[in-house]
Image (tube, grey):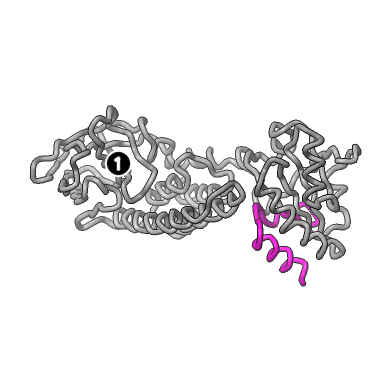
Amino acid sequence: MISGDLDLSHGEEWKPMVYLIRPENFTQLGQSFVGKILDSSEVDDQGHFQFATVTNVEGPNLLEVVVQKKGEQYANRLENENPETDNYFPVVWNPGETLKLNAAIDRFQSSVIIENPTTVNATLLKLRDLKKNAFLKYQTTLGQLQGDEQLLEREKALYEYQSALMRFADATKELFPALMTIKWVSPEGNYERIPEFLVGQSRKWSAIFPNESWVQELAVLADKENLPILIGDHIPNLQFPMLDGSESNLKTILEGQKLLVLDVWASWCAPCRLENRNVLLPLWKRYHDLGFQVIAYGLESNRAAWENAIEKDGASPWLHTSHLEGDQNPVMDSLRIHTIPANFILDGSGKVLAKNLHGEALVDFVANYLGS
């Protein structure tokens, strides 16, 4: 039996209903309009609800208990905007078990309490608390970062939020909470900046539960051919049309170099331009004679704008290349990326040592690697 009590004191905007949703595959977990509606229950004047006996369900099940605002047409719409007010909570339930929840209807996810939770549900509650606290810190940081030039700072704040969740997934021994974490790390399913996490989770759970359908689905999602090149992999021998009109390739450029930054940028990208002036130029001046090189691939379609940006930023000392095909180009396709600024830090063999390090993080990495 699944039942509970809701605090309705701030529930004027909310339907006095609770819905029980079952995602039927990993892709549907935490997503709107796709989960199967197993049951619904009216909330009485005292805030009590109780689902009827759920039949034809084998356990264990990762289910979603959901509330909706008045006027919402769909019972299976899930909010992933703010853990403080999101309208659903995941629970693991076996047929025959008693599961009782208490929550405030207007702060459903953040306020859920499960009476005498099983180990797996206690883990989900810990995950919820971690997510809520990390998100609050993230939102506070975002409020201080405005404007295009602070894009990298906002990305760093997002990564720090995601990292708290990723550490949880890496540490937990519970499959369902780990799968929920993977979805909460990126509800929109964008793992371009963190593909190593996705691959690591797939390897971890595939080794333990190779026949679990959701784990098999995760393995497809984590196929390296569908993700950006990973740390530890080697970059293919990319072909480069150089700024001076010549042709070159990555293997040739790597000859004699100890460390190479493959920088993917654009003349129209404000944080890229700042990185040129404030980070890459000082690094090149200080470490070039020690075996440090930069090759900058521009997402350009206008040669004059490209050349002008290089000149204004003082970026002419290092290597520049572009197919002048905008963001639809062979290099982006080979790297399997869509977002800039992006970079790959390579050793002399073309092995990826690190990715997407910017500002002081990049400065520190170069200094530590080359010794200064």
- Side of 91 where 6 appears, left or right: left
14 vs 108, nearest the viewer: 14
Please report the residue visible at 29 percent of the width from the left and 29 percent of the height from the top: 74
Locate residue 234, reporting x and y percent: 73, 49
Residue 11 lies in quadrant: top left
Quarter of the figure that contains the N terminus? top left
Q: Does the magenta stretch include residue 360?
A: yes
- SS at mark 1 in the image: strand
From the viewer's perspective, tell me whether residue 343 is left or right of residue 35: right
Assess whether residue 346 is covered by the magenta stretch. yes
Q: Looking at the image, can residue 306 be seen?
A: yes
Looking at the rendering, the stretch of residues picked out in magenta corresponds to 345-372
Q: Residue 122 location, x and y as percent?
A: 30, 57
Pinpoint residue 84: horizontal percent, then vertical percent. Answer: 33, 51
Q: Along the line of sight, which residue is nearer the eye, 276 or 163?
A: 276
Q: What residue type is labelled 1?
A: Glu
- In which quadrant is the C terminus drawn? bottom right
**Residue at label 1?**
64
Q: Establish if 200 lies above or below 66.
A: below
Image position of 102 (left or right of 240): left
